[in-house]
């Protein structure tokens, strides 16, 4: 399975994602510059974290107009796997590939620490290797991670099981103590209705080895590889 990691000016987690795929999962991976419309025959595309174009206008607002995003949109509409991490999630929201938006953290501060998220839907290509309701320890690093949407969109996300990850306490409780940024309904990550596009604010690529204090992020990447080999599991 070949991965493509898109690089925008200001990306700073592109090499982390590349390392996780190549050095830990031992899968082919290639960087894709944001001005290219060629996805390099990738089977899955990752939009990494960082500060695309400095986030000077609004997170992801400029990056969504990069030439590569035209190809990413076509790729997604054809069923290709697309994962947006942190800034990549913000770009997917700006591009309309996922619903909703992110606002400033409720405390108006940049947060960089480990959090716990619960896998609330294992019937996706990004979570099929996880156990039901599995708790993952994964770091966050963002200033604008407060996910929000209108009531109708939230109801649709809930009805269609598109909320893939929720912030929780270490023991899996849904309360404000486990929500670091004020995100609506404790949402840490969502997917589209077709299940092939997903985004989350936590950084799984920074949690792929024990030396990083957690290897829980591998669940996502292993799921993507498993889904490519046995795609039926993702919709079971």
Image (cartoon, rainbow, N blue to C red):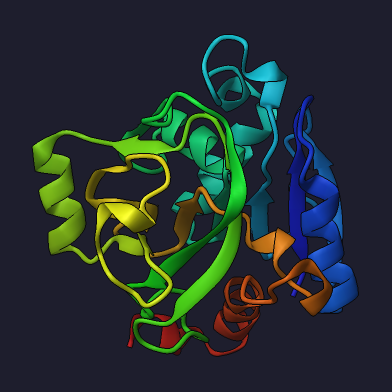
Residue 177 appears in which quarter of the rendering?
Answer: bottom left
Q: Is residue 57 above or below residue 219?
A: above
**Can residue 192 be seen at all in this image of the molecule?**
no
Q: Residue furthest right?
A: 23
In which quadrant is the N terminus drawn? Answer: bottom right
Q: Is residue 32 above or below residue 43?
A: above
Q: Is residue 123 above or below residue 21?
A: below
Q: As drawn, is 154 to the left or to the right of 67?
A: left
Q: Which sits in the foreground, 140 or 30? A: 140
- Counting labels gives 0
| Residue shown at 46% from the left, 31% from the top | 95
Q: As drawn, is 53 to the left or to the right of 209?
A: left
| Residue shown at 56% from the left, 9% from the top | 57
Looking at the picture, how far across and down is residue 35, in whole percent?
77, 27
Residue 181 appears in which quarter of the rendering?
Answer: top left
**Can residue 33 be seen at all in this image of the molecule?**
yes
Q: As drawn, is 55 to the left or to the right of 181?
A: right
Q: Is residue 112 above or below residue 169?
A: above
Q: Which sits in the foreground, 184 or 80? A: 184
Q: Residue furthest top?
A: 57
Looking at the picture, how far across and down is residue 172, in whole percent?
34, 74
Looking at the picture, how far across and down is residue 183, in whole percent?
32, 42
Q: As drawn, is 203 to the left or to the right of 24?
A: left
In which quadrant is the C terminus drawn? Answer: bottom left
Q: Which sits in the foreground, 23 or 169? A: 169
| Residue shown at 70% from the left, 35% from the top | 50
| Residue shown at 17% from the left, 59% from the top | 158
């Amino acid at each position: 399975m070949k991965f493509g990691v898109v690089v925008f000016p200001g990306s700073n987690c592109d090499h982390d994602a590349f390392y996780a795929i190549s050095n830990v999962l031992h899968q082919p991976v290639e960087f894709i510059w944001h001005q290219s419309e060629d996805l390099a025959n990738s089977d899955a595309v990752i939009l990494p974290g960082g500060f695309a174009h400095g986030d000077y206008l609004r997170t992801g607002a400029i990056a969504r107009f990069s030439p590569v995003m035209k190809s990413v949109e076509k790729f997604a509409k054809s069923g290709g796997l697309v994962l947006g991490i942190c800034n990549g999630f913000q770009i997917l929201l700006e591009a309309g590939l996922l619903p909703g938006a992110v606002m400033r953290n409720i405390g108006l501060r940049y947060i960089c620490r480990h959090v716990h998220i619960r896998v609330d839907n294992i019937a996706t290509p990004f979570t099929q290797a996880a156990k039901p309701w599995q708790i993952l320890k994964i770091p966050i690093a963002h200033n604008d991670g407060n996910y929000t949407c209108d009531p109708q969109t939230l109801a649709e996300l809930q009805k269609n099981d598109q909320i893939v990850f929720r912030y929780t306490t270490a023991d899996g409780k849904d309360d404000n103590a486990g929500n670091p940024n004020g995100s609506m309904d404790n949402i840490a990550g969502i997917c589209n209705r077709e299940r092939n596009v997903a985004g989350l604010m936590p950084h799984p690529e920074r949690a792929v080895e024990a030396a990083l204090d957690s290897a829980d992020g591998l669940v996502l990447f292993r799921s993507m590889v498993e889904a490519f080999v046995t795609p039926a599991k993702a919709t079971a």
